[in-house]
Image (cartoon, coloured by chain):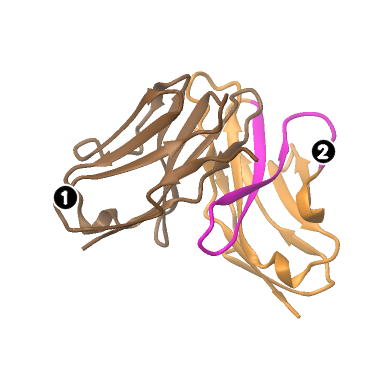
Chain colours: A brown, B orange
Amino acid sequence: DARVTQTPRDKVTEMGQEVTMRCQPILGHNTVFWYRQTMMQGLELLAYFRNRAPLDDSGMPKDRFSAEMPDATLATLKIQPSEPRDSAVYFCASGLVLQGEAFFGQGTRLTVV
Amino acid sequence: AQSVAQPEDQVNVAEGNPLTVKCTYSVSGNPYLFWYVQYPNRGLQFLLKYITGDNLVKGSYGFEAEFNKSQTSFHLKKPSALVSDSALYFCAVRDMYGGATNKLIFGTGTLLAVQP
C-alpha cells in the first residue's frame, strides 16, 4: 500500500533551533507539495515541486524557511531559526501532475516553545 | 489566481438524512476539482475529483459531488449520512491549464457533524 511518509510525526523544539522535516513521496510521483495547517489560517501552501524543481514557494517565509528535493525519494522543509508562531502541523503530499490529486502524509506536528 | 470558497464552517445533519457540503471555485482556465476528508490527528484523504465529462462524480464511502459550471460550484453530497462521516471536509481546485504553477489550493474546510 503506497503512502507518503513523513518524519518526525511530532517535534518539540526551543525557539531559535533549526528544524528539519522530511518527506518520502510515493514512488513514481512527480509532484510534491508542502502545506502548513493551523486553526487560524487553515491549510496554507508553502511550496510546490514538479520533477524535483521548485515551481512555487510564494507562500513560504523566505527568511527562515527553505524547501528542497535532493532526490526523487526525499523532500525536506527546514526552518532556521524557528519561532513559536511556526507551531503547526506540516503536511507533505505527492501526486502525478496529469491526474491532479495529491496524496497526503500523516503530517509533522511542530511545537516551538 | 485560483481560489475556492467553502461558505459554511459547520454543517449539522441527523444520521440517515441527506447531506450537502458547499463549495464554489474561481479559476482562469479549466478546473480540476477535488474533495478531501480529514479525521482528527490524521492527514487529508482523497475522496473524489472532477476533471471532465459527467457532472456527477462518485467517490469513496458513498459520497458524490456535482459540478455546475454556470454556478462555479462543486457541492459534496451523500444520500444518507452516517455518524462516522463526522469529520472536516476540504474542497480543492487546480487550474490544469493555467501554466506551470498549477497549484493545488484548498478551501477553509467545513466541519460535518452527524448526530445519531
Magenta segment, principal secondary structure?
Answer: strand
**Neighbour tally class for label 2: few under 14, some 14-19, many 20 plus, Cα within 10 Å:** some
Q: CA distance from mark 1 to mark 2?
A: 50 Å
Does A88 sit above or below residue A23? Answer: below
Q: Are marks 1 and 2 in contact (CB under 8 Å)?
A: no
Q: Is residue B35 magenta?
A: yes
Q: Which residue is mark 1?
A: A17
Locate residue A63: give its quadrant. top left
Q: Which residue is tagged 2?
A: B55
Which chain letter matches label 2? Answer: B
Lateral position of residue A16 relative to residue A37, left or right: left
Residue B81 at what x, y percent from top left?
Answer: 79, 67
Label 1 CA crowd tier, 10 Å (few <14, some 14–19, many 20+): few
Quadrant in the rendering for residue B39: bottom right
Residue occupying the point 19% across, 45% down: A18
Left or right, residue B2 beside residue A79: right
In the shown orientation, is residue B13 left or right of residue B3? right
Q: In this view of the protein, which residue sits in the foreground, A35 or B93?
A: A35
Point out residue A103 in the picture as x, y percentages from the top left corner: 58, 40
